[in-house]
Amino acid sequence: MRIDIITVLPELLESPFAHSMMKRAQARGLLEVHTHDLRDHTPYKHGQVDDYQFGGGAGMVMMPEPLALVIEKLKEERQYDEIIFMTPDGLQFEQKMANKLSLAANLIIICGHYKGIDERIRQHFVSMEISIGDYVLSGGELAAAVVVDAVGRLLPGVLNDETSALSDSYQDGVLAPPVYTRPADFRGWKVPDVLLCGDPKKIEAWRHEQSLQRTAERRPGLLDNAGQE
């Protein structure tokens, strides 16, 4: 998979992809992440990429021409499955969306700034708009890093144990169950006996029950969406 990220602050994206699973994914040739400094593609003086909004109002808007130029340049080089704009008014990012995007070959992610991007770019280039939550960040870089991490870890070969992702929260519509490790008795706080019994069926049944209980307590709406009581 290749992901091209358009940004005015490429340095913000250096660390998230230089460590842990994202570093491993790139080292194994499973994921390519390329950042493109929008200021390198603007035809305007002094690297200008934003201007005042028509109609007045506080806040600058990212201009259409620099974004159009870099998107068109990338599209000349390869086909893209989605051109994504990170925006607070986009679709809420969730695990099902990450699963779907992990099947793509090439993605473009646009990181907004200021009051956002010119609406004409959204209308004529963007195919998908994503929000990571009902709040506003200073820019789309951190949101883009979240999406890349959530998608990249799902690529076959990234996780050492690929079955690990199958038991993550939200993967099957419920939250993950509690997990424990050694020692079995820590300060008198003991691991549930069922996890030490060695019976996979009993352990799986306990984990399923715990998942449903935790989901009912913390995110009951997930059970409603799944049609469970």
Image: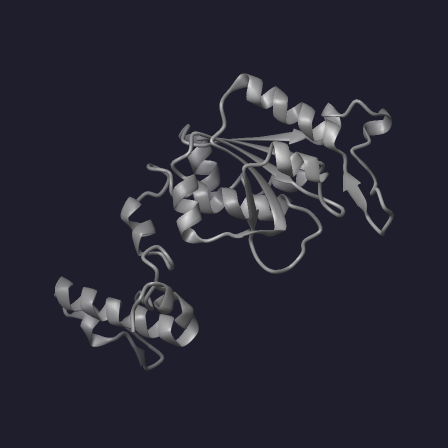
* Quadrant assignment, res 43: top right
User: Which color scheme did the rendering employ for the protein?
Assistant: one colour
Task: Pick the residue in front: 13 or 81.
Answer: 81
Q: Looking at the image, which residue is at 47% across and 44% down?
A: 20
Residue 119 % position (x, y): 70, 40
Q: Describe residue 211's horizontal placement relative to residue 68 as left or right.
A: left
- With 95 as the anchor, is 121 left or right in this view? right
Residue 191 location in percent, x, y? Answer: 27, 74
Q: Is residue 7 visible in the rendered structure shown here?
A: no
Residue 46, image x, y percentages: 85, 28
Q: Quadrant of residue 155?
A: top left
The picture places residue 196, in percent across and down from the top left corner, at 19, 69
Q: Is residue 217 above or below residue 2?
A: below
Quadrant for the N terminus in the image: top left
59 sits left or right of 224 in the view: right
16 w.r.t. 58: above or below: above
In the current view of this chain or complex, which residue is farthest to the top? Answer: 76
Q: Nearer the viewer, residue 225 or 7?
A: 225
Determine whether 13 is above or below 217 in the image.
above
Instruction: Please identify the residue farthest to the bottom as the structure is shown.
Output: 188
- Relative vertical location of residue 217 with respect to residue 123 in this rendering, above or below: below
**Quadrant of residue 28 in the image?**
top left
Q: Which corner quadrant holds the C terminus?
A: bottom left
All told, the count of numbered labels is 0
At x 41%, y 39%, the residue is: 102
Looking at the image, which is closer to me, 192 or 31? 31
Q: Is residue 77 visible?
A: yes
